[in-house]
Image: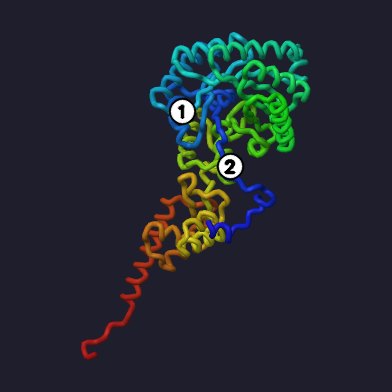
Amino acid sequence: MSLANDLIYDWNQVGAATRAPVNIGVFDDTLRDGLQNPSVVEPSLDKKIELLHMMPKVGIDGATIAFPARSKRAFDEAVEMCREVQRARLALRVICTGRTVLGDIAPIVDVSQIVGMKLDVYAFIGSSAIRQFAEGWNLDWIARRSADAIDLAVRAGLPVTYITEDTTRSRPEHLRTLFRVAMDHGATRLCLTDTVGHATPKGVENLVQFTRTVIDEHGAKVGIDWHGHNDRGFALDNACRAVEAGAERVHATALGIGERVGNTAIELLLMNLKLMGIIDRDLRALPAYCEMVARATSWPIPTNYPVVGRDAFRTATGVHAAAIVKALAKGYEWLADRVYSSVPAAALGRAQEIGIGPSSGASNVIHWLRQRGLEERPAVVEAVLSYAKSKDHVLSDEDIAIAVREAMHRLIRSRAARRTREPRGSAFD
């Protein structure tokens, strides 16, 4: 740790308060909000269950599994997923969601009673003036409808998180009224949503602080959730700012899938919260989880995607490779993992990769040979490098192996030819 402090000056920490890891809840909305993306394929029940098994292994605390009122299939799958969580004793809080409509809340209560499991109820309704105008609602009607829905869940003994849709464009006086109604009727959490991805980080900070003030004025012990979308590209920034401002629970989806351009990406959120010192969780299974989601939903992972993309820890540039090779030569795996990377690959169960291509240098080839226990003969290094520089792409391992073999064969033939040309001594010598 002292080596890290000596070698990396962290401007991110200038003026920041020193903090120990805290109990921030990271909740996965992949199986609900994520599946609202119009381009994904909805996974089968078996695949959904596989994902539930993976979630606790990557530091996820809870998951929204279904909107049971949506269809009979959704209801039946919610029952089966709850049973599997119980059977496998998964360390996962289970959530079902619905509108603040009695007809949406009742099926959640039914699922809970069928499986004998206390589910979290996430009840949502639009709160912004623009939504009210479009829908023909008024604040009194929203408040009454919210109170009735919360009452139904509370009477069933289920914890309720009250979700104001489009919170980031809602008037403070409207939010104050609705939050108070929710707390008066027994909601245990308030979820602030950036439904259309409108907020900036400063806006998130303002909203969380306002909500905390309303809670403190009321005197209730109520938590704050944050749920953001990525329409302006701020989703990850906003989620981190919400946590710093006082939200104790954040929602996200694997690979950021979700309606329109998607939600906060859970893999980026987990890694950044860890790098910020806010959480301390084992994330080595995170790439496998994201790959599982990608397969289950037919959602391709871009090669340059942070943290879990194919090229996240891969370089073929000579200057970069040389720095990594020199770090390894000093005997510091830690150094090699950070000298040209802000995200340590080892934290994700991955490693820095050095390829060979037209921008490579001798270090790239030497590293490739060393990794495979092969001799670093200068002639071979030069031949492989020359071959790579004649191409327009990074070579595959198979291409490099062929180039190495050909270089070795040429070297052997050259030596043999020299031996045959060397004059031999006469019998009288």
Q: Position of residue 372 (x, y in %)?
A: 38, 57
How many numbered discs?
2
Q: Nearer the viewer, residue 394 or 193?
A: 193
> Which residue is drawn at the image coordinates 51% and 44% (left, top)?
310
> Which residue is drawn at the image coordinates 40% and 62% (left, top)?
407
Q: Position of residue 244 (x, y in %)?
A: 65, 39
Label 1 sits on residue: 52
Q: Nearer the viewer, mark 1 or mark 2?
A: 2
Residue furthest out toward the bottom: 428
Label 2 sits on residue: 278
Q: Position of residue 302 (x, y in %)?
A: 56, 39
Residue 203 appears left or right of 40: right
Type of amino acid at the residue the image marks with label 1:
Leu
Q: Residues within 10 Å of mark 1 (few under 14, many from 20)?
A: many
Quadrant showing the C terminus:
bottom left
Q: Position of residue 260 (x, y in %)?
A: 64, 27
Residue 114 appears left or right of 205: left
Q: Mark number for residue 90?
A: none
Secondary structure at badge 1 equals helix
* Sequence-earlier tag: 1 or 2: 1
Q: Is residue 286 above or below residue 44?
A: below
> Which residue is drawn at the image coordinates 50% and 36% (left, top)?
59
